[in-house]
Image (cartoon, rainbow, N blue to C red):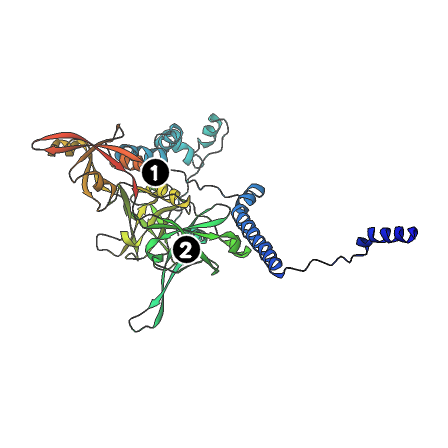
Amino acid sequence: MEEKEQKKEEQQEFDFIKEKIKDKPINKRRLLMRAGYDLACAAAFGAVACFVFVFLKPHVEEWLYPEENSAITIPKDDAPQDESGDGEGDEEAGEGKDSPDETEAEEGKDSPQGGEAVEGKDSPDGPQDEDRTGGDPQTVIVQEELEIEDYQALQDKLYAVGRKANQSMVTVTGVTSGMDWFNTPYERENQAVGVIIGNNGQEFLIMTEKSVIADAQAIEVTFSDDASVEATLKKYDGNTGIAVLGVPLRNVSEKTMGQAAVASLGNSYLVSQGTAVIALGIPSEHTILCGTVTSSQNAVSTVDANYSVLTTDIAGGGSGSGVLVNLEGEIVGLALSGYGSQSGRNTVTALSVSELKQVIEDLSNDRDVPCVGLYISTVTDKIAEEYGIPKGVYVKDVEMDSPALAAGLQEADVITAINGEEITSVEQYSQKVYGLHPGDVITITVKRQRGEEYVDLDCAVTVGVLE
């Protein structure tokens, strides 16, 4: 009996072991919420990773694979200080008039020894003269008449220079599309000549005119081998109208790369009346015209600068654009559509390239051209004495909506200093302004007439950009 009770107690004690453990019921709502939370986290993580990847990719590539992109540097030319004195001196030096050796050689033609040297072969004393000179060979000068074939050979050489320079020329096409009054779509193309002025390792830099690509939806550059590549506008100068385009090298074929050449900018200060030049791109991109410079004295007054104009006897001016190159194939003048001949003659005129090199370099390196907004001229000693005007830079006009107008500069002011540095000529003024950056604040000191006297005024000018 006791054993039965003991077994019963043991059975009751271990009955819990026989209990069946059921699985916890699945909470579908919570499961869906957890899955949605995980998906949201994954999406957020993916978005952040994508953003970080896109943001850091160019920096990582630049660090791992540094680009060969480098700034374009254009050597500047020193303007002659005294055109009359320096020009004559350069000409004499170039012709060797001051060279002792050449002077003796010229005098030798009229001297007894010179005459015996030329006529020594027909003179009985010729051999004796040869002995006196130590047996040196005698120089015989023979004058030959030029033939028609010689002229043609010279022409062939000139055109060879032009053809080689044409490798730097391109055609720029600006494509503009829209709707007319009758809701009919149209497409208009403007074309102008462009010049390859640089290769920064990533793209060709093309110089052209802003008016051609104004409001264009697409820009296309056609190289000398007729290959066309899409281009983008980098920078432009609202004063001269010069624009610089970029053509990625990865889009240029090897064939085109082998034929395209970067143009060389020459020294236009060495160009004078009578200098032989070659016009390219006028009136069409493949034209080669030869001629001479008839004048280099005229000046075009623009905002903050005056540019010299090279006038030629080459027909085909007007609204066309192109370049003038010297006999070395270097560009010495830019024929822009806005700076055609002012004399009414249909001849090619071009702006002196030496005075534009700083502007071209700034635009090529993606820098804005600084602007103050003044039309100016130099007050020379003669003008100062004749009109009683202080020496300095005379303000002929002030550009509307310019930093100069906002600063209170007026017509007939005479600029005497910028930031305390004396200014006596337009060249000094332009050089000082081009050395600034948009946003810089400068102090321009002027003399302004009040009654019969001039008073000094300081104007604080914030340098801007001409649109």
Q: Residue at x 60, y 54 (%)?
A: 38
Residue under the point 14% across and 29% down = 455
Residue 350: numbered disc: none
Identity, as a three-letter code, of the amino acid under mark 2: Gln
Q: Which residue is at the front of the view, 54 or 174?
A: 54
Vertical comparison of 339 with 398: above or below: below
In the image, taking residue 380 as reference, residue 179 lies left or right, namely right
Q: Is residue 154 visible?
A: no
Q: Which x, y percent locates residue 320?
A: 32, 57
Secondary structure of residue under mark 2 = helix
Mark closest to the chain's N terminus, 2 or 1 = 2
Left or right for 10, reference 158? right
Q: Where, by quadrant of the figure, is residue 370 drawn?
A: top left
Neighbour class for label 2 at 10 Å: few (<14), some, many (≥20)?
Answer: few
**In the structure shown, which secondary structural element does the residue marked by tag 1 occupy?**
loop
In this view of the protein, which residue sits in the foreground, 264 or 306? 306
Q: Between tags 2 and 1, which lies in front?
A: 1
Quarter-of-image position of residue 219:
bottom left
Q: Position of residue 328 (x, y in %)?
A: 42, 45
Mark 1 surroundings within 10 Å by alpha-carbon count, few (fewer than 14), some (14 through 19), many (20 or more) = some
Q: Position of residue 461 (x, y in %)?
A: 25, 37
Instruction: Tell me residue 253's x, y (percent).
Output: 53, 56
Going by the image, does 411 lie left or right of 242?
A: left
Q: Is residue 418 visible?
A: yes
* Residue 437 badge: 1
Look at label 1 and name its amino acid: His
Which one is in front, 83 or 380?
380
Q: Are marks 2 and 1 in contact (CB under 8 Å)?
A: no
Distance between the Cα atoms at labels 2 and 1?
52 Å
Q: Who is closer to the viewer here, 408 or 96?
A: 408
| Mark number, residue 152 | 2
Please tell me which residue is depicted at 43% across the width and 40% down the height of the picture. Answer: 73
